Image (tube, rainbow, N blue to C red):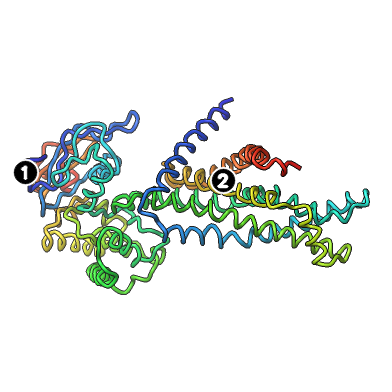
Amino acid sequence: MRWLSRFVEIVGKVGLFSLRVLIDWLKPPFEFAQLSRQLAEVGNKSLALVVVSGFALGAVMTLHTRSTLVTFGATAMIPAVQAVSFFVEIGPLVAGLLLAGRVGSGIGAVLANMRASEQIDAIESLSIDSFKFLVVPRVLACVIALPFLTLFMDFAGLLGGFLSEELSSHIAPALYLNRAFDYLQWSNFIAPTLKTAVFGFIIGSVSSYFGYTTDKGAQGVGEAATNSVVVSSLLIIVADVFLIKCIFFLFPDTAI
Amino acid sequence: MSANYSIAVEFKRVMKSFGAKHVLTDVSFQIGHGQALCLLGRSGTGKSVTLKMIMALMRPDSGEVWVDQDNVVGMGEHRLSLVRRKLGYLFQDAALFDSLTLYENLALPLSRLTKKSKDEIDDVIRQVLADVGLGADGAKYPSALSGGMKKRAGLARALVLEPKILLADEPSSGLDRITAAEIDELLMRRKVEHGTALIIVTHDVHGARRVADQVGVLDKGNLVAFGSVDEVSQSENDVARRLITE
C-alpha cells in the first residue's frame, strides 16, 4: 500500500502545482515568445511521430477488423468502424500516451537539467519569474498542441486504414470516406478531440512538476524524465475514464 | 533599515540548516559598496549558500540578510525582484541558458527589465561582450563555448544590468592560472571603475589576495575569521591561517 499512498501524495502535489499554473496563466506578463518556442517544440517535433504511428495503427486495425467482419459479411462497415474508433477513442488516447512519452520526458529532463545546472536560479536572479517563464508556456503549449496532433493522428489512421482496405478490396477513396463519416457525428468528433487538451494539461503539469521541483542534481534528470512519463500516462488513462463519463453525460447521443 | 547607507550587504546572526546538518551558524558580517570580499573555506562549509541567501534564492532559518538597505528575508516577490536588479550573479558553471545564444542570454534581462530600444540593447551587449573578450562570439550557443569562455559569458550576463553588487561563485574554478587571472582582472576593473561591491566565493587564495579588501573564512558553518588578508593570515584560527597562507 505504500506505493498507493506515494502515488496519492504525488497526485496531490501535482494538483497544487497545476493550480498555480492555472492562476499564473491569467496573470501578466504573458510569455508569448516562450509559448511560440514551446509550441514548435511540442507540436512540430511530435508531428512525424504522431502521423507515422497513426498511419501504422490505422492499417493494422483495418487488417484485424476485416478478418472479424468478413465472418459476418459486414466488410462494408470497416470504414465506419475505423473512423468511429479512431475519432472517439483510439486517436485521442494513443496520441496522449505517445506524447506523454515524447513530450513529457523531454519537459521533465529539460527542466530538471536546468534546475541541476542552476539555470532556474539564474532566471530568478535576473528578476524573472521562472515559473511563469518556464512552466506556464510549456503547459499551455501542450494544451494547445494536443488536440491538433490528435487530429493528425485521426486522419493518418484513416489514411492507413484506407490504404490497407484498398489493397484488400480496391475500395474507391470517395466511397471509403462516405462510409467512414456516415456514422460519425460532430459530437463524436469534437468532444473526444477537445478532451486531449486535458491530456495536454496533465502531460505539461506533471512533467513540469517533476522537472522543476527536482533537487537531486544530475541523477534527478533521469528520474524526472521517467516519472514524467509514468505518472502522466497513468493519469491520462484514469482521466480518460472520467472524461468519457463526462462526454456521455453532456452528449448522451454519443454513448453508442 | 540599516543606519549605515554605505553598507552593500550585511548578515546578522544568520542560521541555516539542511535537515540535521548546520550549514551556517550565527554568521554575521558586512561589506561596503566598492569593496571586495572573498569568502574562503573548505567544500561544503556554506559559501555558496551564503551567496544564494544574498540573492534570496534561499532563505535563512533565522537572522537577517540586508542588501543595500533592504532586509531580503521574508520579502515579497515584487519587492524582491526590485532588490535583485541591484545584484549580479556569476554562477559556478555560468548557468547560461542552453537554448539561447550568448547574445540572447544577455538580451533577455535587458529586454524584460529595461526600457531600452533594440538598438540600445545591441550597443550594451556589444560593449559588455567586448569588455569580457567575447566580442565575436555573440551568435554562439553555450555548448560551443569553452570553460573559460562560459565564465566570461556568465560574467557578461551578470554585468549586463550594471549591478551595484556582484556575487561570484568560484569564478576561477576549472580555469588555468592565466585565464583565472584575466577573470580576476575583469572583476577588479568592475570594482574600481564602477564602484561595484564584489562578494566572491573562491578556493583560489592567489586570486583572493589579488582582489580582496576583506576575506572571510567559513569552517563548519562558522565564520571563523574576517578581515583584511593580513589580519586573517595572523588569525588565531588554524584553518583560516592555513587557508590564506598556503
Mark 2 and mark 1: Cα distance apart in space: 55 Å
Task: Determine whether, in the image, residue A55 is placed left or right of residue B15.
Answer: right
Give the percent coordinates (x, y) of residue A238: 62, 37
Give residue B93's position: percent from left, percent from top. 34, 55
Q: Chain of mark 2?
A: A
Q: Residue furthest left?
A: B4
Left or right position of A249 against A32: right
Residue at point 20% right, 33% down? B63
A231, B232: nearer the viewer: A231
* Secondary structure of residue under mark 1: loop
Q: At which x and y percent is residue B9?
A: 15, 45
**Which one is in front in this view, the residue at disc 2 or the one at disc 1?**
2
Can I make out residue A109 in this image?
A: no
The kind of residue on which mark 1 rests is: Asn
Near-viewer residue (A185 or B98): A185
Q: Which mark is residue A198?
A: 2
Which residue has dot 1 on it? B4
Quadrant occupied by the C terminus of chain A? top right
Is there any visible trace of residue A127 in the rendered image? yes
